[in-house]
Amino acid sequence: MEKSLLSPDVVLRLPLKRIAVLQSRGMRQVAVLLLLAGSNLSCVAAKPVTVEQLEQILAATPGASDVQMAAQLSDLVLIERLSAARLSRYETDFPGPRTRQALTVLADMSAFLNPPGEEIPAIARPDPKAQREMIALTVNYVNQTMHQLPNFFATRVTVSFQDNPSLDESRRDNNRSFVPDLLIISKPLHSVGRYSVAVLYRGGREVVHAGTVQPGPQGLTTSGEFGPILGTALLDAAQGNLVWSRWEQGAAGQEAVFRFSVPAEKSHYEVSYCCILKVNGDRVYYRQFSAYDGEITIDPSNGTVLRLSLKATGLKRPDPIVKANIVVEYGPVELGGRTYICPVKGIAVSLASETRPLFGGREEDFPPLQTSLNDVVFEQYHLYRASSHVLPGFSEEQPPNPPNANKTPD
């Protein structure tokens, strides 16, 4: 086993106040929120393709309509990560709204994979001393640079996708308990809503301006992109054997990727699922701190964090959620004539069901699982001044049917 590059002593040089927050299992900033409204099953068989094969398919259908192209793309699944640069080029070549959505789903679902071979530079790995220097720069970046950001606000725009098929609601009883012989009609991932909310960063803290109380996106989402989630990842990485992974070719040059694995007993990655249906029809929250695998991508010259990926590994049946993965990407943003590194993109993928079988239930009796995807974009960054007008809270453009969850577990 490789020796970890990040010792607990290094991480604990972060501010004491921050460490107290990161070690608290009740922390809210980086909790994973799951708000699923239904239990469904997708039975669509997808064809696995590489990025190169996807390009060949796109090049071979120049005259296809928006509907035809979107339908063809919905039958594919990538086995390599699709970069933001390639996605942007495809969206320019195929501007139809349905095709663009299908491309977004393909790219987002590939975000947890390695990039194609040509995007991994064939150069030697740095020696252990150079690796430790990179990590030291990253610790300094998270500990100091992130806290020196100016006060600003941005808009978090979330587009939610689900593979939820239609259900014959007449086959469910009055208490909405699970009925095994539901009529299920398969449907691939499709948009179920678009939401926007203002995020204010002031005095080193992130605040979501909720405005009026309205439901937010369904599925898996995250918070704390403006600092807390990075500190938490480094804290866990100190306990999770942080080691070198690979080089990657980024838009601005070579990027260094490190990986780590965190056991459940040392994890601060909380999965909070709303909601489980009990036999009497009540809905209750399900919470669990899960083991997870992480990857952190940095600029080797200054330690700037460019990408963070977390994949839960401690979830399995009969848990109501068996997948909870997130990616946060960071990039240059201009604020007041200066350039800062801020969150620009978030991806959250979950696989869950609304109910769980009774203890000792058979595998075939488990309720169907639903894939949910949230595509998050941070935009409209502005410096925050006393005269600034902060946008209202969640603005729901396509209302879903969120759960009326008002109970917590005993």
Image: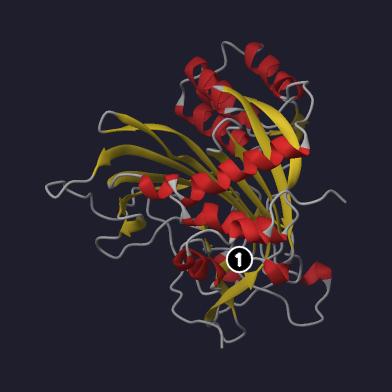
Residue 190 vs 99, above or below: the answer is: below
Is 357 in front, or is 149?
149
The structure residue drawn at horizontal position 72% and vertical position 76%, both measured from the top left corner, is: 357
> Left or right: where does residue 215 sit relative to residue 393?
right
Q: Residue 187: give x, y in percent of width and height.
A: 62, 46
Q: Residue at x 56, y 38 (%)?
A: 303
Asked if residue 168 is positioned above or below residue 404 in the image, the reply reads: above
**Quadrant of residue 286 within the rendered picture:** bottom right
Q: Is residue 320 visible?
A: yes
Residue 284, picture quadrant: bottom right
Please tell me in which quadrant of the rendered image residue 254 appears.
top right
Residue at screen point 68% across, 74% down: 356
Q: Residue placed farthest to the right in the image?
A: 1
Q: Position of residue 309 (x, y in %)?
A: 62, 46
Q: Secondary structure at mark 1?
A: loop
Question: Dot 1 surroundings within 10 Å: few (below 14), some, or many (20 or more)?
Answer: many
**Rendered view: 83 above or below 153:** above
Q: Quadrant of the C terminus?
A: bottom right
Q: Position of residue 68 (x, y in %)?
A: 58, 24
Relative to 376, 399 lies left or right: left
Q: Amino acid at mark 1?
A: His
- Residue picked out by circle 1: 268
For the point 57% across and 41% down, which residue is it? 137
Instruction: Give the camera-side residue of 267 and 244.
Output: 244
Rendering colour mode: secondary structure
Relative to 64, 55 lies left or right:
right
Note whether residue 40 is visible. Answer: no
